[in-house]
Image (tube, rainbow, N blue to C red):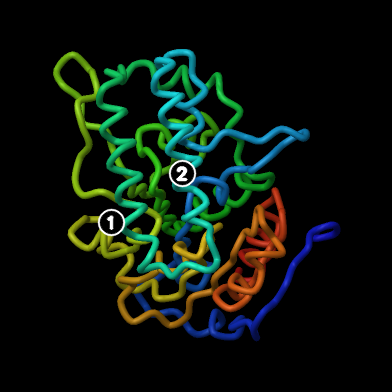
Amino acid sequence: MLAGISVIFPSSLPFTVFHISPPSPCVSPLVCPQLVVDFDFTLTRVHMGGQRCHCSWGIMDNSPDMPEYYREEANRLLAKYYPIEVDPKMTEEEKIPYMVEWYQQIHDLLVKCSIRQASIEGMVSASSARLRDGSEELCQKLHRAGVPVLVLSAGMGDVLEQVLRHFKVYTDNVKVVSNFFNYNEQGIMVGFKGNLIHMFNKNEDAIHSSDYFEKLQNRTNVILMGDSLGDIKMALGVPQPSSVLKIGFLNDKIDERLPAFMDNFDIVLLDDQTMDVANSIVDLLK
């Protein structure tokens, strides 16, 4: 199943910890794990057929429903701030002020666009956003087993929720934490709900006050998947974690970023557009 995939195991993997006896409140056949996953370019593909796929931001950037001034300014901000996000020589603490600056400017720009809530479904349908191969299979397995799936994203929640609906994987075991639009009575986007979520502050602390968090009290084994070093913190807030298996999707600037990924993830997948590794691990846990 894994033929053709470049897999690196930087450290000894804690497979054995997943075979502990589950606590009595847990009835899942998957030994009480939970899945914590980033959305853009982790759950979704980076490229397909030689063309780059849209992330949740790209869905809006490339939609004809968005004004041209939005695209021009969004691209200018991307060119300025994305190199900072992936710069392996900068510390997270050095990057955070720039990320907050970037997101606040994009959020202000989006408010000016008067986005209609009813237009989001069409934007997603017309986009090139695609789930990684095997994502539907993985989600079906986790849904059947009642395994909670937490999608943590610094993108736009309204857009990525529609992507999940479009591919029929937004089931009742899935919780999305992201930046959600606030709409007026006419269905026009006028701002954002809650606190700003960027790539370096998204973690399970964001759901401690929700009903969803109660479902996780006995699920202290975590499979975490992300495509940036900021994603390794997504499991922060898990109460007394027994083990966290971290899977990193290294999508670009591979030679430059590989050492840092190997230092922080248990498994590093190089330009892999599938969920084959995750599916194989879940199969082992049955």
Amino acid type, label 1: Tyr
- Tag 2 near tag 1, CB within 8 Å: no
Residues at marks 2 and 1, CA–CA distance in whole angstroms? 37 Å
Q: What residue is shown at x 71% (from left), y 32% (from top)?
A: 51
Left or right position of 210 against 278:
left
Q: Quadrant of the C terminus?
A: bottom right
| Extreme-right residue of the structure | 3
Q: What residue is shown at x 19% (from left), y 46% (from top)?
A: 194
Location of mark 1 (residue)? 212
- Of 198 and 102, which appears nearest the observer? 102
Tell me where residue 137 appears, x and y as whole percent.
63, 47
Tell me where residue 120 appears, x and y as whole percent.
40, 22
Left or right position of 277 against 159:
right
Check disc 2 and report its element: helix, strand or loop.
helix
Amino acid type, label 2: Lys
Quadrant of the rendered structure where residue 26 is? bottom left
Location of mark 2 (residue)? 80
Q: Is residue 103 above or below residue 116?
A: below
Check disc 1 and report its element: helix, strand or loop.
helix
